[in-house]
Image: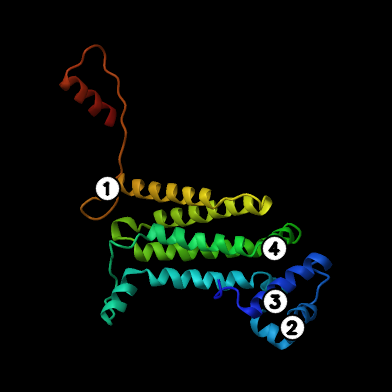
Amino acid sequence: MTAVRTHTHAQAVDAAVDLFTRQGYEGTTVEEIADAAKVSRATFFRRFRSKEDVVFADHELLLEEVVVMLAATRPDARASEESGHDLGRAWDADVDPYLEVCRAARMVFDHHVGQRETSLARYALLQQVPALRDRELITTHRYERAFTHYLRDTLPPERSASTASIAFAASVVAVHNAILRRWLRTPSLELRPELEEAFADLRRAAVLGTAASPLADDGTPVTRRVVVTVVEGVAGPDEVARAVRDALV
């Protein structure tokens, strides 16, 4: 993933994680990281604002790549590119936004697995430094927000309700993180098939959930109620209808 692992960022991340592992987070200075990464102190601060930032430098580039990848699949972007004009908001039945979000999350997973040594060392470091765990939570939230915004803008109107988009985005991130942590704890496991299956389950649930929630004429979701009633003996249609009507009162 060349767009994510640029040479300077790769050197800085690897150098920082290695130094933090050997010397401790508090015991490592910015100057030592810059020297190990073979960049000047000025260059370091142009690219990274702090020691904390350099640990997650590739995450920042990865998030940017995710946003760009999703933006390229937006129907309005595709229509504008094909026609050469800004067509405004459009819907494209050939684009499955749920699938695109899962594809973006898969790219994040593959990045971690592809940078095995750095990912494992960083995971161990996160267990030791609370500030880095807090930063990881912020990064997780940014992925959720990017996925949610994409779904709101890309799903057809009857499927783009805020709560549904938030729920799907959060579910994808939660499943991704749970399976990634399993891999980080036991990197000998091959968990990509499990990730794919989990994402497929989430997509099916999202589609079924949409199908189960019809819209009224004004576009608002119709709330369904399940009513259970009991009638004595052999009841005819009138008695059953009356019992159901009474239960609804």
Q: What amino acid is found at the position of numbered circle 3 in the picture?
A: Ala
- The residue wearing badge 1 is 214
Residue 249 visible in the shown view: no
- The residue wearing badge 3 is 12
Q: CA distance from mark 3 to mark 2?
A: 8 Å
For label 2, the SS is: loop
| Snapshot quadrant of residue 70 | bottom left
Q: What amino acid is found at the position of numbered circle 1 in the picture?
A: Pro
Q: Nearer the viewer, residue 175 or 153?
A: 175
Q: What amino acid is found at the position of numbered circle 2 in the picture?
A: Lys
Whether residue 95 is situated above or below residue 214 in the rendered picture: below
Check residue 117 in the rendering and tell me which mark sits there, or answer none.
Answer: 4
Rendering coords of residue 3 (x, y %): 54, 75
For label 3, the SS is: helix
Is residue 70 shown left or right of residue 39?
Answer: left
Mark 4 closeness class: few <14, some 14–19, many ≥20 residues within 10 Å = some
